[in-house]
Image: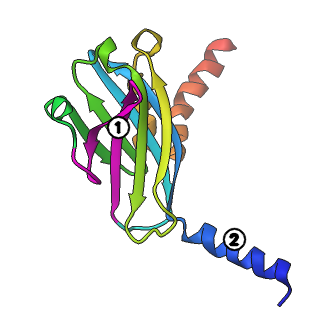
Amino acid sequence: MNPTVGIAVILTVLQAAHCQMIKDLSACLLGQSLRVDCRYENKTSNPLTYEFSITKDNRKHVIHSTISVSENIYRGRANVTMHKNLVCLYLQSFTTSDEGVYMCELKATNDYTGNQTKNITVIKDKLEKCAGFSLLIQNTSWLLLLLLSLPLLQAVDFVSL
């Protein structure tokens, strides 16, 4: 076999073996709570484990996790919800002392390529408020949103005539 073809086959197999990939990490304020959205692409139905942590003062603090043990100071304030291709961290009573570099780490069972991680710097004064409409977008297919918006688009066309 040609060495170039062999390398291409190995890279293709390794890429296919990669079960999930973090696509986006974002943060916003939901009232007095911080919401961190970790969006990923999943290529398997294998169970997903996660860890949300913060790095501040050059030290990693685990906020909520199925991979390791969460720190006591976050246990009563943090919870996580999982939707299709989205893991959300909610940190109650968010203050400036909670500012830092937040990390989302994901691992699918039997994914031998290792954990996926993504970081975001969170500063309270620079956070935007979470949009209510974004929850609809996260849980609704784009086609359904398009179909639901057609009457609105037709009404705009009628008004502009």
Residue 89, relative to residue 48: is it above or below?
above
Residue 102, image x, y percentages: 41, 32
Which picture quadrant has residue 17? bottom right
Task: Give the camera-side residue of 50 and 53.
Answer: 53
Q: Image quadrant for the C terminus?
A: top right
Q: Which residue in the structure is indicated by mark 2? A: 11
Q: Which mark is residue 139?
A: none
Residues at marks 2 and 1, CA–CA distance in whole angstroms: 31 Å
Task: Give the camera-side residue of 143 and 108.
Answer: 108
Secondary structure under badge 2?
A: helix
Contact, CB < 8 Å: mark 2 with mark 1? no
In the shown orientation, is residue 44 left or right of residue 97?
Answer: right
Residue 97, relative to residue 120: is it above or below?
above
Q: Residue at x 52, y 65 (%)?
A: 113
Q: Which residue in the structure is indicated by mark 1? A: 53
Which picture quadrant has residue 90? top left
Q: Of the residues shown, which amino acid type is indicated by label 2? A: Leu
The range drawn in magenta is: 47-69
Q: Residue at x 48, y 47 (%)?
A: 117
Which picture quadrant has residue 93? top left
Residue 130, image x, y percentages: 40, 21
Asked if the magenta segment contains residue 107, the reply would be: no
Residue 144, can we see it? no
Residue 66, relative to residue 131: is it above or below?
below
Q: How many neighbours does mark 1 have within 10 angstroms: few (below 14), some (14-19), or many (20 or more)?
A: many
